[in-house]
Amino acid sequence: MKAWRFYGFGDMRMDEVPVPELKPGHVLVKVLCVQPSVTEAQLAFGIRTLAYEKIKKRLETEAPVQLFGHEYCVRIVETGPGVGRFRAGDRVAARAKLPCQQCSFCESGKSALCRKGPIIGFQLPGCFAEYAVLPEIALTLVDDRISDSEAACLQSLSDSVASVETAELRIGDTAVFFGQGSMGLECMQIARVSGAGKIIAVDVRREALEVSRELGADHVINAAETDSVAAILDLTGGNGADVVFECAGGSPKQGLAGTRSLMQAIDSVRSGGKLVGVSWFGAPLEVDIDLLRERSVRYLFPDISTLEHLEHTVGLVASGRVRLKPAIRHVLQGLEQVPQAFEITANKSKYQAMNPAQVVVA
């Protein structure tokens, strides 16, 4: 089969490799649609972010190696021994972070707390290939009302569900979302259906804010033209928002906000409010902890998404409560387009992209 392999940072090549061997508890799948996550797009070009050192070590010791591709829709070709929930012909999507099934958490029925298991596309081969072998425990059935393109977004959406769940929104809470890329737009919609009151979206791109309005934002703030903190305080009677989601931070080399959006988020949350850190920054950063302590601001980080989160996303999208299509702007045809998908996803502002660029494989 054809598969993309990395020989180093910025060096990916499409090679002929054997179709992976089917194992017990796994399924062999044909890849239908796949997209690089923003994190994968940064790592592909050697930008420091989550798991940079681990990927660097794999490239130094194992290259060429199949990497990335944990956001996808696939069709099952064959099931291995022990697989009971799926059959050939089923369309499925998957979560990325898996339980190890060996630690005390996993053995006591608390696998959602496990942090020792592998990640598809990082420790396990992902789906930038014609075929893949995937563990049954990662998968959920895709509703017929969901397209292949939408299904490839479900993994990211499950992380967004976990982010909003972590915030423990109360009915009527004012919620602010810094960054209106895929996860910012997803978190915003999930907060809306979870009972948030006033919803405020912040970005520096007009096209992203137009989508925000379409998907339910009550107010949009262009941070390139307006003092976003002042605008948020004005909209909240000078108090700040009950919950602020920071979804814009990261490497400025790829159009992200660095740490600026985090500092603005801290200034935008009310005393006693909650700040949810969705972004990955790729390096240590300096935060005024005393200020957070003085104002009783709770700085929270999302729980890991589980299979239950993923299954919930299917219902959200199939019912139309969460809409993904408006953010999908770049759909490329053919496996050979994978490098272009990485290029677009790594430089969203340049290409006016919201969701990562997608590749239709079959």
Image (cartoon, grey):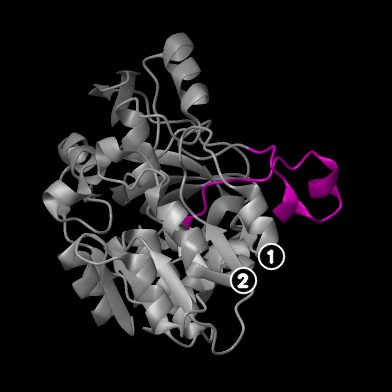
- In the depicted view, which residue is nearer to us: 234 or 178? 234
Relative placement, left or right, of 186 versus 337 is right
| Residue 299, picture quadrant | bottom right
Mark number displayed over residue 263: none
Tell me the SS state at disc 2: strand
User: Which residue lies at the image location 48% right of the left edge and 71% below the top edge?
Assistant: 313
From the viewer's perspective, is 247 left or right of 356? Answer: right
Q: Residues within 10 Å of mark 1 (few under 14, many from 20)?
A: some
Residue at image point 37% right, 24% down:
18
Q: What residue is pinned by disc 2? A: 271
Q: Which residues are magenta?
A: 93-117
- Quarter the N terminus occupies: top left
**Relative to 190, residue 88 above or below:** above
Q: Is residue 93 above or below residue 51?
A: below
Tag 2: amino acid: Ser
Q: Relative to 305, is 313 above or below? A: below
Query: Magenta stretch: residue 231 in it?
Result: no
| Residue identified by numbered label 1 | 296
Percent x, y of residue 93: 44, 58
Q: Residue at x 28, y 76 (%)?
A: 220
Q: Residue 87, position in %: x, y? A: 50, 59
**Residue 181, percent from left and from top:** 31, 59
Decide if residue 230 is on the left or right side of residue 122: left
Residue 327 placement, left or right of 300: left
> Mark 1: which secondary structure?
loop
Assess disc 2: are there few (<14), some (14-19) or many (≥20) residues with their C-alpha within 10 Å of its C-alpha: some
Task: Say above or below: 313 vs 7.
Answer: below
Q: Is residue 317 visible?
A: no
Residue 338: % across, % down: 21, 38
Q: Is residue 272 visible?
A: yes
Choose between 166 and 359: the one closer to the eye.
166
CB contact under 8 Å: marks 1 and 2? yes
